[in-house]
C-alpha cells in the first residue's frame, strides 16, 4: 500500500531568521525533504534534508513532492502561509487532511512595525502576479492600504490607486524587510510608476495625519545607542513583543531572546483577580531573576476608566525606562493589531515623545485561525479586510465589498454577527475558530451550532469569511 505524504507548510516570516518561530525550526529538523525558494532554504543551512527548490513552475515542484511517498516534507512559505503563498497550490494538490500549517510573521506586519503604526482597519491587496481584482476606486477612501508587490507592472496599478485616493496620503515603499538590504523610502504619487522595486516589497498608503510623529522618508526606525533619562541615566528601551496566539512554540526567536534577557517584564491582564494569559504563554522564556509586573486593562467600555488604566500603565513603564533600564511588554498576537500595546504606546508617547521603542511582530490570531482551518487569506486578487467585532457597520461594508474578511474578538457580539453573515449570504463560507493554539480550541464550519452559546464562543475567537468565488 502506498504511504501518504506527511506535509508541513511552515511560515518563515519576512526574511530574518530571528523572526522564525521555534515550531518551524523543530519541523525543519525532522524533515526528510525541504521545499522552498532558494532564500528560504538558505535560512536552514544545518538541515540535511533533500532540497527541492521552488521556481516559476510550481506544478513541477508539486510533482516532485508527490514522489516523496512516506517521507516527512516541509514546505517553506515566505511570510505567513495563509496570505498569498505557496500554501494554496499545495493544499489543492494534496488535501487539507494531510497538511499541517505553521503560521508565520507577514511582511505587512513588519512594514507597519517599521513605521511605528498600528495596522488596525488596514486594507490589504495582492499585486504579486497580476493586478488585484478590486478596482482602485473601491480602496480610495481607506486610511491605510497595504499592497504586496514584486513586479514592475504592479506599480502602474498602485500609481493609479494613489492618484484616486482621497485625503492627503504618504506613500512608502518597503523592500527586503529585516534583511541587510532593507530599504524604506517615501515616494510621490507621480514617481511611483517608474520607481525600481525589489521582488520582496510592500507599499503602504497612509493618511498623513496618522503619521504626524512618524518616520522621515527612508528612516528604518533605528534608535540611538543611548538616551538620557532622569538623573543622567541612559534611557532604556521598551520592547513591545507579540507572543503569538497561544502556543509558546509560535513565539519568534527574537521575541524569546529579548524576554529571556530583559529584567523588567510587563504583562496585561483583564482584572485584579484574573490571571495574565500572556504570562502563562511566555512564562517559560522569562529569566529567573526578572521582575514581573501585571498591568490591568479592564474589559469595559467606560472610556474614562480605560484612559486612567492606560495612563497608569504608561507611567509604570516610563518609570523603568527613565532609570536607564529596558523593559518588555508582552501582548497576545501582534503588538500593532487590536492590541493593548497600541494604547500603552500612545500614552507613553504623550508622556515622553522621545522614548526609545522597538516593536517585535508576533503571529496573529488571524494567521493561526487560517492555519488551523486551512483557510486562504488573500487567495486570488481580492481585498483582505481585518476588523473588530464591535463595528457592525464596517463588517457589513466589508461583506459587501467582497474579498476575505476576518472578524476579531467576537465575544458577546456573536449573535448579531451571525445574523449579519446570514443576511449577506456569507455564513456558509465562514469558519469560526476560538482559543487558537490553547486548551479548549474549537473550529466550527456550521455557524448555526454557535447559536447555543457557551464559553468557547468568547472573546478569544475569530471568524474568517472566504471570498465568494472560493468553493467550500
Image: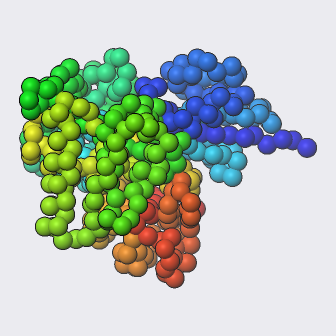
Q: Where is residue 317 in the image (x, y as percent from the top left)?
A: 21, 44
User: Is 252 placed left or right of 33 in the picture?
Assistant: left
- Going by the picture, which residue comes out furthest to the bottom? 452
Q: Position of residue 436 (x, y in %)?
A: 51, 57
Quarter containing the N terminus: top right
Quarter containing the C terminus: bottom right
Between 189 and 145, the residue placed more toward the observer is: 145
Between 399 and 262, the residue placed more toward the observer is: 262
State whether residue 123 is above or below residue 63: below
- Going by the picture, which residue comes out furthest to the front? 289
Q: Which residue is drawn at 44% across and 70% down?
A: 458
Q: Which residue is drawn at 13% across and 67% down?
A: 304
Answer with the quarter of the image where residue 321 lies: top left
Between 315 and 465, the residue placed more toward the observer is: 315
User: Is 201 placed left or right of 212 in the picture?
Assistant: right
State whether residue 401 is above or below residue 322: below
Answer with the quarter of the image where residue 174 lies: top left
Q: Is residue 459 at least partly visible in the picture?
A: yes
Q: Position of residue 320 (x, y in %)?
A: 21, 39
Q: Where is residue 360 in the image (x, y as percent from the top left)?
A: 34, 36
Q: Residue at x 53, y 57 (%)?
A: 438
Answer with the quarter of the image where residue 204 lies: top left
State whether residue 147 is above or below residue 409: above
Q: How is the image coloured?
A: rainbow
The number of discs equals 0
User: Is 83 placed left or right of 72 in the picture?
Assistant: left
User: Is 150 placed left or right of 235 in the picture?
Assistant: right
Q: Which residue is drawn at 58% across and 27% down?
A: 36
Q: Is residue 356 at least partly visible in the picture?
A: no
Amino acid at each position: 500500500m502506498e504511504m501518504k505524504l506527511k506535509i508541513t507548510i511552515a511560515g518563515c516570516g519576512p526574511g530574518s531568521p530571528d523572526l522564525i518561530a521555534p515550531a518551524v525550526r523543530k519541523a525543519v529538523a525532522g524533515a526528510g525533504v525541504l521545499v522552498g525558494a532558494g532564500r528560504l532554504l538558505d535560512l536552514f543551512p544545518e538541515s540535511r534534508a533533500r532540497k527541492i527548490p521552488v521556481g516559476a513552475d510550481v506544478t513541477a515542484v508539486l510533482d516532485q513532492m508527490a514522489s516523496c511517498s512516506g517521507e516527512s516534507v516541509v514546505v517553506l512559505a515566505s511570510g505567513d502561509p495563509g496570505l498569498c503563498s505557496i500554501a494554496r497550490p499545495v493544499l489543492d494538490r494534496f488535501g487539507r487532511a494531510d497538511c499541517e500549517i505553521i503560521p508565520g510573521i507577514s511582511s505587512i506586519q513588519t512594514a507597519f512595525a517599521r513605521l511605528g503604526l498600528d495596522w488596525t482597519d488596514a486594507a490589504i491587496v495582492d499585486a504579486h502576479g497580476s493586478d488585484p481584482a478590486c478596482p482602485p476606486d473601491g480602496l480610495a477612501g481607506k486610511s491605510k492600504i497595504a499592497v504586496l508587490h514584486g513586479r514592475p507592472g504592479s506599480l502602474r496599478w498602485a500609481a493609479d490607486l494613489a492618484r484616486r485616493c482621497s485625503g492627503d496620503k504618504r506613500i512608502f515603499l518597503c523592500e527586503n524587510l529585516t534583511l541587510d538590504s532593507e530599504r524604506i523610502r517615501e515616494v510621490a504619487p507621480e514617481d511611483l510608476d517608474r520607481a525600481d522595486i525589489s521582488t520582496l516589497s510592500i507599499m503602504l498608503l497612509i493618511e498623513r495625519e496618522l503619521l504626524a510623529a512618524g518616520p522621515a522618508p527612508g528612516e528604518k526606525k533605528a534608535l540611538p545607542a543611548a538616551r538620557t533619562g532622569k538623573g543622567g541615566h541612559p534611557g532604556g528601551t521598551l520592547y513591545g513583543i507579540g507572543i503569538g496566539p497561544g502556543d509558546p512554540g509560535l513565539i519568534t526567536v527574537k521575541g524569546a531572546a529579548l524576554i529571556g534577557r530583559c529584567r523588567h517584564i510587563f504583562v496585561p491582564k483583564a482584572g485584579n483577580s484574573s490571571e495574565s494569559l500572556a504570562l502563562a504563554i511566555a512564562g517559560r522564556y522569562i529569566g529567573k531573576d526578572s521582575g514581573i509586573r501585571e498591568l490591568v486593562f479592564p474589559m469595559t467600555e467606560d472610556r474614562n476608566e480605560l484612559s486612567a488604566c492606560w495612563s497608569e500603565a504608561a507611567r509604570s513603564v516610563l518609570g523603568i525606562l527613565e532609570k536607564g533600564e529596558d523593559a518588555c511588554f508582552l501582548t497576545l498576537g501582534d503588538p500593532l493589531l487590536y492590541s493593548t500595546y497600541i494604547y500603552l504606546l500612545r500614552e507613553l508617547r504623550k508622556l515622553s515623545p522621545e522614548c526609545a521603542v522597538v516593536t517585535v511582530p508576533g503571529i496573529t490570531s488571524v494567521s493561526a485561525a487560517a492555519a488551523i482551518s486551512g483557510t486562504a487569506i488573500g487567495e486570488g486578487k481580492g481585498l483582505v479586510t481585518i476588523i473588530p467585532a464591535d463595528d457592525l457597520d464596517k463588517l457589513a461594508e466589508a461583506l459587501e465589498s467582497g474579498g476575505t474578511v476576518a472578524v476579531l474578538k467576537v465575544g458577546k457580539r456573536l449573535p448579531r454577527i451571525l445574523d449579519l453573515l446570514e443576511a449577506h449570504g456569507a455564513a456558509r463560507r465562514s469558519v469560526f475558530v476560538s482559543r487558537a493554539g490553547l486548551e479548549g480550541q474549537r473550529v466550527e464550519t456550521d455557524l448555526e451550532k454557535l447559536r447555543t452559546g457557551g464559553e468557547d464562543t468568547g472573546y478569544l475567537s475569530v471568524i474568517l469569511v472566504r471570498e465568494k468565488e472560493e468553493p467550500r
